[in-house]
Amino acid sequence: MSWEFSDFLAACQHRVQQALPARLQNTGSEFADMDASKHLNTLGEASLYSLMNGGKRVRATLVYATAQALNSDIDGLDDIACAIEMVHAYSLVHDDLPAMDNDELRRGKPTCHIAFDEATAILVGDALQARAFELLANLPGNNKADTKLALVRQLSAAAGPRGMVGGQAIDLASVNQQLDLHSLQTMHQLKTGALIRVAISMSASWCKASPAQAARLDEYGKAIGLSFQVQDDIIDIESNTETLGKTQGADQALNKPTFPALLGMPGAKALAAELHQRALDALSEFDERAAPLRALSHYIIDRQH
């Protein structure tokens, strides 16, 4: 990873970290009395805890990197980046619940249902998802109603039963099952890949990419969305709990289908490398302004947490 990309990634991470808290405010209600407000404050505290609990901010960085590849100004993209990070955070809160993966550690800290309680964690996920779509509906620009509607459509499809939630449903049903490669890829293109892919497509829509540019960027998004999960499966075996910030070997313990289990570790690493090359090929017609996108693909398959 080049020094220049390190700077770009750090700047994007800092930018979204600064933007998120302000966009989570106003958890109170005009109808709440003092006692009710205490409960709303707890919900707000738990939401902030889950949203600001570290993370690589890859999805937000993809929003900004896509705009740079299209030679567009990134100043109007903070709400889009924050909306995607909110949906991602909600998905992790629900994924960690006892009814799902039953994880007690996330990024080195107690998961939301451990730090607070299970009911609060469910409501935190609901609140973050709703707030994400509120941000998109209130994006600046009265003359951009069609674009804002398109963004809502894109994110709802990526987060819903045709995307992330659908992938999670397949994942839960696949415990103790053996999937073939096509089925495993389909599951993870939905569960993991859909939100990564939509971060790129939403930015491309806002920046008014041409149809040809949007198609190439979508091919890139499909490739890195799957390579992200392949690398997750690899480091779940090769890394450790301290580095991962979550329980190492959790997927193996739950007997979930993974790429190393199906292909072997050399096969999984070969698939990650193939997907990385596919991502780079998709960007072949973009100039040096797409360097952050190219570097992000490297970063995804080189990371250890």
Image: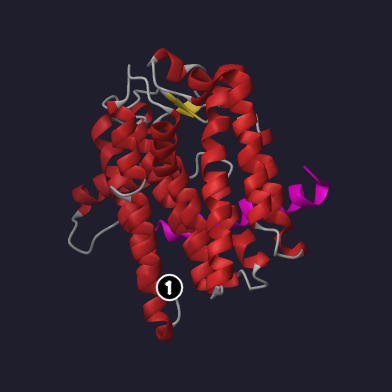
Q: Residue at x 59, y 42 (%)?
A: 56
- Residue 260 is situated, as x and y percent measured from the top left of the image, at 53, 21
- Residue 292 is situated, as x and y percent measured from the top left of the image, at 70, 55
Q: Residues within 10 Å of mark 1 (few under 14, many from 20)?
A: some
Is 122 one of the magenta-colored residues?
no
Q: Residue at x 64, y 59 (%)?
A: 65
- 141 is higher (above) or lower (below) than 170: below
Residue 54 seen in this snapshot: no
Q: Quadrant of the N terminus?
A: top right
- In this view, the residue in front, 255 or 59, is 255
Q: Horizontally, is 139 left or right of 237 in the view?
A: left
Badge count: 1
Tell me where the magenta segment starts and ends, as one range: 1-26
Is 10 one of the magenta-colored residues?
yes
Mark 1 lies on residue: 139
- Residue 167 is situated, as x and y percent measured from the top left of the image, at 35, 39
- In this view, the residue in front, 127 or 228, is 228
Residue 294 seen in this snapshot: yes
- In this view, the residue in front, 257 or 45, is 257
- 126 is higher (above) or lower (below) than 255: below
- Residue 61 is situated, as x and y percent measured from the top left of the image, at 60, 54
Q: Quadrant of the C terminus?
A: top right
Q: Quadrant of the rendered structure where residue 264 is?
A: top right
- In this view, the residue in front, 286 or 45, is 286
Extreme residue in the top direction: 253
Amino acid under disc 1: Leu
Q: Residue at x 60, y 71 (%)?
A: 75
Q: Horizontally, is 228 left or right of 180 in the view?
A: right
Q: Main secondary structure of the magenta part?
A: helix
Q: Residue at x 53, y 63 (%)?
A: 215
